[in-house]
Amino acid sequence: MSLSRDQIVKRIAQELKDGYTVNLGIGMPTLVANHIPPGIDIVLQSENGILGLGPFPKENELDADLINAGKQTVTVLPGASYFSSADSFAMIRGGHIDLTVLGAMQVDEKGNIANWMIPGKMVKGMGGAMDLVAGAKRVIVAMQHCDKKNNEKKVLKMCTLPLTGIGVVDLIVTDMGVMEVTKEGLMLTEHAPDLTVEQIQDETEAKLIISPKLKPVKV
Amino acid sequence: MNTKKIFKNPKEAIADIFDGATLMVGGFGLCGIPENLIAALREKGTKNLTCISNNAGVRDFGLGICMANKQIKKMIASYVGENDIFEKQFLSGELEVELVPQGTFSERIRAGGAGIPAFYTPTGVGTLVAVGKDEKEFDGRKYILERALKADFALIKAWKGDAYGNLVYRKTTRNFNPMMATAAKVTIAEVEEIVPVGSLDPDTIHTPGIFIKRIIQGASYEKRIENKTVSV
């Protein structure tokens, strides 16, 4: 059995450390906020201008002037602050954000990531992703290991889509396992409980280095 | 008191926006957009505009209404995924587009208003964004050179403002508005309420009046929510 979306984000939540300021990307990464371990104090940043992001509002708390980077209505926690996009990206580019979690279309063994464009097909723009991967101290990718719809691999030797950043990814968590980006390549450190290394390698274009401490993902 | 900055309505405030002008338009998604000024621009029908705006609105709200009316020749933006007309016009070649990383986008505007013609940033090194740009190493890390952005007009939105053009924004409506206010020859602000001079605490003013040439009070605000999400 491979990991569910919920299990992927739960595993990523284990990477959170007390005192971190974290920016969570749109989609699956946003769900990491639901699994912050107890006793750990995290400040969530949203690049449209919030530090101290809170939960989604109740119907009677809805405020059109208060949204997150995914344009969803949100609330803020006590101690929050609002600021301009220039200040927000000074935080991001200036190395003040401890961790960002992003989705990806492709990643590769050099830590390159592609998540913003499919030439001739999809033109949405990179939003803040290029700044986040360039500036955050640690970059974690949350994604499905393969594109099952198009039967294409996503963990590659070299990305084929236009890149978002080069050599920026630190950790990749997919439905099949956890991979660390090392100088030598991608090191498989954890595997989905019922999958073998061979099964994971079959779905991965990059040659995986198997960690001597390889263990099943525990969530 | 100098009340020359106060205009009666959006139509008068944008009357001199000309065909082929470069405009900055504030807002993130549909949050903090100058909706009354955009509606007046759609009404005026000005063509061949270059619009510098983080997003392109949606099909029937925000800058999307000017795009649907084929008034925009070129967009400089960071994310346009919520507007299907944008994607169609771009892929068919009708619309020229420059996609800019959001932090580079906001800094290019900030620099434009602050008298800085260009700056080096680590964002986009090794990507399509870096093509044709000067690359330089500082302290062992690579950076690319980005040019500042300026405009003929900026259309921005604030919560409250006074006759001097001092502005206060509310919550996440601030986004790109304060930088755009500084980077255009003529900045036109729309606010929900024009308040008496002296009633805004100088300590809380986000945009000092020097940057604002014209100010109007919007007649009404739809403030459409793009992605309503509630907790259960």
Image (cartoon, coloured by chain):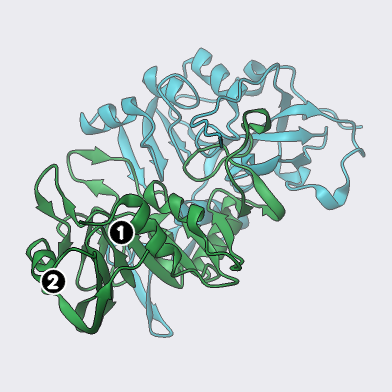
> Going by the picture, which residue comes out furthest to the top?
B43
Percent position of residue B160, x then y = 77, 34
Mark identifier at residue A128: none
When asked about the image quadrant of residue A195, the answer is bottom left
Q: Which residue lies at the image location 10% right of the left edge and 61% below the top edge?
A: A203
Q: Nearer the viewer, residue A137 or A164?
A: A137
The chain coloured green carries which letter? A
Please identify which colour was used for chain B in the image.
cyan
Percent position of residue A160, x then y = 14, 58
Given the image, on which type of amino acid does mark 1 rest? Thr
| Number of marks drawn | 2
Q: Callout 1: 10 Å neighbours few (<14), some, many (20+)?
A: many
Q: Which residue is mark 1?
A: A164
Q: Is residue A182 visible?
A: yes
Q: Which residue is mark 2?
A: A197
* Chain at tag 1: A
Q: Tell me: residue A9, above or below residue B163.
A: below
Q: Callout 2: 10 Å neighbours few (<14), some, many (20+)?
A: some
Q: Is residue B132 visible?
A: no
Image quadrant in which the N terminus of chain B is located: top right
Q: Nearer the viewer, residue B25 or A28?
A: A28
When asked about the image quadrant of residue B31, the answer is top right
Given the image, on which type of amino acid does mark 2 rest? Val
Q: Horizontal placement of B102 versus B169: left or right?
A: left
Image quadrant in which the C terminus of chain B is located: top right
* Secondary structure of the residue carrying numbered label 1: loop
Q: Which residue lies at the image location 52% right of the left edge and 30% below the top edge?
A: B228
